[in-house]
Amino acid sequence: MNNKRWRNAGLYVLLGIVVLALATSFFERQPAAKESWRYSQLIDAVQQHKVEKIRLSADRSIAQVTGQDGTQIQVNLPPDPQLIDILTENKVDITVIQPTDDGFWVRAFSTFLVPIALLVGLFVLFRRAQNGPGNQALNFGKSKARVQMEPQTQVTFNDVAGIEQAKLELSEVV
């Protein structure tokens, strides 16, 4: 009885971990939708002094632009070596965004612990099914044939009365 309680508790914990993992993947914080510009629009706005500051990603592929009126705009950047020169000539405040690091535990949980927990859960499930009624969980390939030994009878030719013809034929065969 106590062993069954622990198995059920383990399955509930496994179910909780799976639900938590799915919930974090579905309800992860999504950034607010921002207005987006083409690169040429960014250069025009910088030259017309409509850009107050710009935040560049560490790999210089994305820029978050803040206009003079405070609007937030996102721009996908091509690899243009003259961009920094254009921004400094027009006195735009430039900052570089450091890449976000989720942390060791989040990466370990998502890449290591969740698959291991699922494998352990499957192992427990198969073990439970194997111990259950019928014991049919993993026996689908095994043969059900049984060897039955007949008790040996000690009947001899002398024990058989009559039927002389049958005795004669049997002795010819043997």
Image (tube, rainbow, N blue to C red):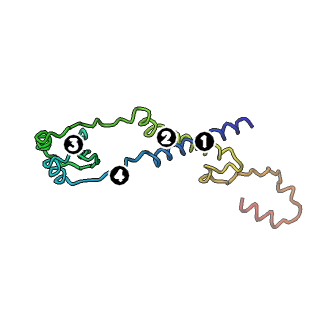
Q: Amino acid at mark 4?
A: Ala
What secondary structure is found at the residue carrying circle 4?
loop
N-terminal-most mark, 2 or 1: 2
* Pointer 2 residue: 114
Mark 3 or 2, closer to the camera: 3
**Residue at coordinates 24% horizontally, 38% vertically from top-left?**
58
Label 3 sits on a secondary structure element that is strand
Which corner quadrant holds the C terminus?
A: bottom right
- Is 73 positioned to the left or the right of 143 in the image? left
Q: Nearer the viewer, mark 3 or mark 1?
A: 3
Q: Position of residue 89 (x, y in %)?
A: 10, 40
Q: Marks 1 and 4: which is nearer the front?
A: 4
In the picture of the structure, the residue carrying the numbered disc 4 is 33
Identify which amino acid the numbered label 1 is placed on. Val
Residue that carries the numbered disc 1 in the rendered image: 124
- Circle 2 packing at 10 Å, graded few (<14), some (14-19), many (20+), is some
Q: x, y (%) of residue 96?
A: 24, 36
Contact (CB < 8 A) between labels 3 and 2?
A: no
Callouts 2 and 4 close, C-beta under 8 Å = no
Mark 1 vs mark 4, CA separation in Å: 44 Å
Q: Earlier in the sequence, mark 1 or mark 4?
A: 4
Looking at the image, tell me whether mark 4 or mark 3 is earlier in sequence order. Answer: 4
Residues at discs 2 and 1 in contact (Cβ within 8 Å)? no
Q: CA distance from mark 3 to mark 2?
A: 45 Å
Sooner in the amino-acid sequence: mark 3 or mark 1: 3
Q: Label 3, label 1: how many angstroms apart (C-alpha)?
A: 60 Å
Where is 97 relative to 162, above or below?
Answer: above
Mark 3 sits on what residue?
Answer: 52
In three-dimensional space, the C-alpha distance between marks 2 and 4, rounded to whole angstroms, equals: 31 Å
Q: Nearer the viewer, mark 2 or mark 4?
A: 4
Residue at the farthest bottom position: 165
Q: Is residue 29 left or right of residue 46?
A: right
